[in-house]
Image (cartoon, grey):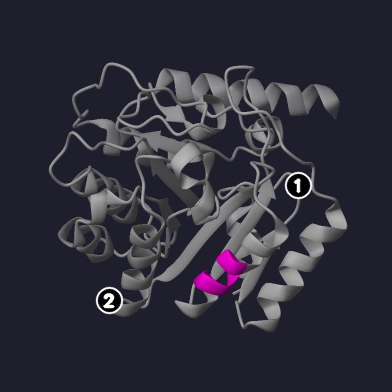
């Protein structure tokens, strides 16, 4: 069984390489990569492997920005076919160099998967599009099943951890998803970057107030020595307390545990709505 698991992991990686596709699993050094690839699950990272931003926690680096690959949506749909996915998750680097932040590319990828796999559920994890409402509307018009946008950390830490983003702008994006559509809204954050529990509960309050459907909370893990050190390791029981708090506020699904990442077990989280 262990041999078969390893072979499946390698087969998944080879298939993605053959299709010249990036995954956030690999680029962000996700601790769950082995498990997901072994189950033939991956989160596709579109629009290149370099970012126009430089968030302190993230392993995806700024660098030379690539031109959009017009064939990428087709290849993502092909990967969905080869993996036999019933639930596809697509994210991207942040592309502040593009007028629409890459929203049209997201929409085309969604539409290509829909055309070939109408039964497949689709979740997109999008950047903030610099507050561009028309960009968000373009993604909404493509009708994914879930739109995820992570607030990542409490607002008090933004200056150090997420300096090119704005907490209120992120909340407004999530709120707009609920106001403009019946698409499920999702968001998440990491703990261990210097926040305290009161600040975590405030973020849960803020997301509950705008009717966010799914909230994920996981432990920050330092991708390298160049990244901020872990300030605290949160006990599993505290993650349970976060989940209970959100449930009491009426959040439909709280997914909180040390190894939780926003796209990890996304299909299972969706099924609990």
Within the image, what quadrant is residue 232 found in? top right
Is residue 270 visible to us here?
Answer: no
Magenta residues span 202-207
Q: Which residue is mark 2?
A: 180
Instruction: Provide residue 207's location: percent of width, then percent of height.
Output: 51, 70
Residue at the (50%, 31%) spot, across then down = 56
Q: Secondary structure at mark 1?
A: loop
Crowd band around label 1 with a 10 angstrom C-alpha radius: few (<14), some (14–19), many (20+) = some
Instruction: Provide residue 162's location: percent of width, then percent of height.
Output: 44, 41
Instruction: Provide residue 33's location: percent of width, then percent of height.
Output: 65, 32
Q: Main secondary structure of the magenta part?
A: helix
Residue at the (38%, 24%) spot, across then down = 49
Residue at the (52%, 44%) spot, across then down = 84
Who comes first in sequence, dot 2 or dot 1?
Answer: 2
Is residue 13 rendered to the left or right of residue 142?
Answer: right
Residue 246 part of the magenta segment? no
Q: Which residue is mark 1?
A: 258
Q: Is residue 18 above or below residue 209?
A: above
Is residue 84 visible to us here?
Answer: yes
Q: How many marks?
A: 2
Within the image, what quadrant is residue 198 found in? bottom right
Pick the front one: 168 or 127: 168
Q: Is residue 137 above or below residue 57?
A: below
Quadrant in which the C terminus appears: bottom right
């Amino acid at each position: 069984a262990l041999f078969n698991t390893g072979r499946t992991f390698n087969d998944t990686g080879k298939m993605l390489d053959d299709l010249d596709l990036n995954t956030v699993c690999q680029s962000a050094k996700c601790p769950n990569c082995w498990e997901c690839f072994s189950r033939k699950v991956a989160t596709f990272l579109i629009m290149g492997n370099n970012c126009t931003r430089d968030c302190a926690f993230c392993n995806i680096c700024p660098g030379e920005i690539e031109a959009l690959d017009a064939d990428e949506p087709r290849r993502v749909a092909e990967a969905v076919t080869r993996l036999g996915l019933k639930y596809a998750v697509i994210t991207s680097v942040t592309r502040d160099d593009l007028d629409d932040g890459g929203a049209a590319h997201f929409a085309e990828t969604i539409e290509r998967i829909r055309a070939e796999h109408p039964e497949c559920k689709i979740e997109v994890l999008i950047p903030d599009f610099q507050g561009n409402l028309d960009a968000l509307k373009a993604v909404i018009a493509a009708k994914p099943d879930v739109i995820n946008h992570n607030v990542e950390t409490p607002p008090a830490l933004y200056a150090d951890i997420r300096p090119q983003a704005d907490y209120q702008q992120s909340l407004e994006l999530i709120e707009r998803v609920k106001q403009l559509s019946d698409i499920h809204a999702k968001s998440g954050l990491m703990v261990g970057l210097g926040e305290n529990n009161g600040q975590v509960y405030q973020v849960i309050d803020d997301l509950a107030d705008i009717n966010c459907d799914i909230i994920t909370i996981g432990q920050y893990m330092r991708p390298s020595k160049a990244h901020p050190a872990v300030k605290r390791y949160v006990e599993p029981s505290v993650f349970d307390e976060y989940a209970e708090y959100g449930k009491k506020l009426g959040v439909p699904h709280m997914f909180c545990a040390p190894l939780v990442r926003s796209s990890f077990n996304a299909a299972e989280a969706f099924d609990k709505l």
